[in-house]
Image (tube, grey):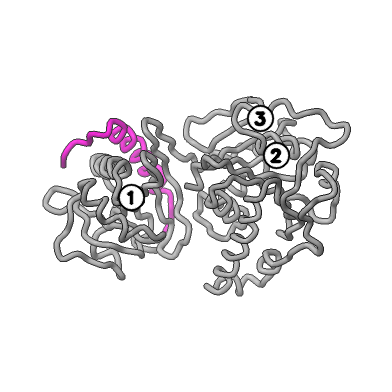
Amino acid sequence: MTQPTYAAAQLASDRIHRHLATHSTSQQSVEPAATLPDSATLAALIDAAFWTSLRREEGYIPRISLAFVAPGQSDDAVAFATSLSLAPKDLTKLAAAVDRAGLHLGVWPQQDELRVWGITRSLPALCLVLEVVLPGLLVVKQSPSEDSGKFINIAVVQGDEIKIIDPQAASSPAYPALLTSLQSQFSTGSAVNVLLQLAVSIRMHGRGGLLLVVPVGSDAWTESILQPITYAVVPAFSGLADLMRKDAGKKQGRRWEDALGRVVDEIAGLTAVDGATLINADYELLAFGAKIVRRKGSPQVGQVTVTEPIEGGTPVIAEPAQFGGTRHLSAAQFVHDQRDAIALVASQDGRFTVFAWSASEEIVHAHRIDALLL
């Protein structure tokens, strides 16, 4: 196997391989688990994906997903009569065929080199997937089970920056309860958490957005919103709430999942309008395009604790304006004044931050989760 020419490939593969070897052994699965690539194989996959991400095919960025899986481990694969090389020029030509979500290029060693043997949708448990998101931006993922709809992000590699996701990052008692819950949903690959789906959908529309979640049965939040609200929703829209109130047995079907996805995208789309979108803790839509103001008598928020769920990450005290724009400052102020609310903020550049009040630290907690959403 040839040595990678992307300088960070071997360093990233060594760190990711150690992480996978440590954490994958602790995961329980009743299904046959996929084989994890060794460090050299992973480095070769990262190298090929990185150089492919910098190429163009008829002006388009080649968005590919490489799955390290043997041909016999996939039931519905499109197998090639002759396998293809992992050369960036070949991967770039194939990119258009696997541009849609859920399709992967199956890669497996053949005659001492990695070859692309076909296209597959189904993957075995714990299968490693390497996805090209943007030029120079790669995400290493795993599927916790064959039927899971949400992959677990393992690492993000961008240029010479390597971020390994820490599944225990939010276990500290200093973290707000909601952040711990949200982090656990990413760690288990659950696709049912509504806030998780809203975060993904808000980030995907690419315009930036701000979603505020306020308590049920309280109108204290109105003290932090400029009145009157231009786009107030009366009565509150309950489409998402109605779906979440259904019995557990009715939440397992494809029809329910499709309906949930449509409503989530509808609400997430409202965040593209200038201002904040408001829902309550029961997921009822209250308003959108709302303007946040500092509550009367409340001081301006001066500092927040900034964290990111990656290995080696340490909390940093910063001014809101240091790590974001107007949305971040408004969200921090809202949570500072309405301490039983949370705010989800997406930047146009893809950054995503969850703001919540930390009672133990008496400070607004800004949790960067964009590495989880890629």
Magenta span: predominant SS is helix
Tell me the quarter of the picture where residue 264 sits.
bottom right
Mark 3 residue type: Pro
- Would you name the residue on which mark 1 appears? 62
Going by the picture, which residue comes out furthest to the right? 297
Q: Indicate the position of residue 27 as horizontal and vertical percent values.
A: 43, 52
Mark 2 residue type: Ala
Mark 1 Cα-neighbour bin, 10 Å: few <14, some 14–19, many ≥20: many
Q: Nearer the viewer, mark 2 or mark 1?
A: 1
- Would you name the residue on which mark 3 appears? 320
Mark 1 residue type: Pro
Q: Residue at x 69, y 26 (%)?
A: 303
Q: CA distance from mark 2 to mark 1?
A: 35 Å
Q: Are marks 2 and 1 in contact (CB under 8 Å)?
A: no
Q: Horizontal placement of 325 versus 215: left or right?
A: left
Q: CA distance from mark 3 to mark 2?
A: 9 Å
Going from N to C along the chain, the mark reached first, 2 or 1, is 1
Q: Nearer the viewer, residue 135 or 12?
A: 135
Please provide the residue range marked out in magenta.
Answer: 1-30
Look at the image and say whether residue 75 sits in the magenta stretch: no
Look at the image and say whether residue 9 sits in the magenta stretch: yes
